[in-house]
Image (cartoon, helix red, strand yellow):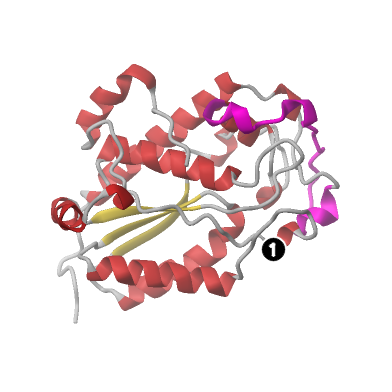
Amino acid sequence: MTTAAPLGPDVAGLAAELGGTGSPVLWEHLTWPEADRTVTGTDAVIIPIGATEQHGPHLPLAVDSMICEAVAHGVSALTGVPVVPTLTYGVSGSHGDFGGTVSVRPETMIALVEDLVDSLHRAGVRQFVLLNGHIWNNGSLDVSAEKLRVRHGDARVRALGYVTMYPGPEVDGHVTHGRGLMHANFFETSVMLHLRPDLVRMDRAVSHRDVDSFWDYRMDQVSDTGVWGRDVAEANAVHGSAEFDRCVLTTARAVSAAVGEPWPDPKHRP
């Protein structure tokens, strides 16, 4: 869908350091014997999880899937951990009545992720990074991870967002408040201008002043455009490239260390 080479000319050196080759390992491109050999070499996978939902009048519906998949491919290139095909539907019902959104129920997401991990576990995979690109997926992915840890005592499962590996306040989204309501904002628009400028309609870009609130709301209750965040018209590809590279590098360093992390002893208690 969307792949961007991370970190410019440093890719080869970083890949050598973190265990990759500089090119992502894409599960869907492998034959079954190649998949078997890949699992024998590294028993980990990255599962990117995005959404198909409104992103204001200026961004395509696939923003969350595109950014998450591109980060996942960059992490795979640096670490050698394979990436399975992206889940492009998410828990998006809270966007309400904006057009274009295609959503699944939280229960559906939980079941789907469980089925995927169970299938990959039968194939020999034992370490699962659920890489999330849509914040309203968080609850379902946390539930899935908990259920899978209980079910498979010989597996490790972690759900995380692609910006999780550096402090949240460092995400330059030009949003002060809103928690999960940050959406189609300066950050996402800048990253899309880096990844897929052909899909960004900057002549339609609008902003929305974020406000503090105790409650989270449906997006159509608090924004008439589907945007939450200031200064969207100031978004730019240079900023997007820097943010994207940081997401890839911080996540790759974390994943590289994670797949080599010692297991508890004993690894599995019957």
In the rendered view, would you say 40 is above or below 20?
A: below
In the rendered view, would you say 120 is above or below 184?
A: below
The residue furthest bottom is 270
Q: Residues within 10 Å of mark 1 (few under 14, many from 20)?
A: some
Residue type at mark 1? Gly
**Residue in the image at 25% along x and 24% along y:** 12
Residue 194 horizontal/vertical position (percent): 54, 26
User: Relative to residue 131, is residue 252 drawn left or right?
Assistant: left
**Residue in the image at 57% along x and 46% along y:** 64
User: Relative to residue 57, is residue 52 drawn left or right?
Assistant: left
| Total number of numbered discs in the rendering | 1
Q: In terms of secondary structure, where does tag 1 sit?
A: helix
Q: Nearer the viewer, residue 103 or 168?
A: 103
Q: Magenta span covers which residues?
A: 194-223
Residue 240 horizontal/vertical position (percent): 56, 27
User: Relative to residue 183, is residue 167 drawn left or right?
Assistant: left
Q: Nearer the viewer, residue 10 or 209?
A: 10
**Is 109 covered by the magenta stretch?**
no
Tag 1 residue: 93
Quadrant containing the C terminus is: bottom left
> Is most of the magenta stretch helix, strand or loop?
loop
Residue 99 horizontal/vertical position (percent): 76, 54
Residue 6 horizontal/vertical position (percent): 39, 28
Q: From where the camera sits, is residue 70 visible?
A: yes
Q: From where the camera sits, is residue 82 visible?
A: no
**Residue in the image at 58% along x and 54% along y:** 51
**Residue in the image at 71% along x and 37% along y:** 175
For residue 148, which quarter of the picture?
Answer: bottom left
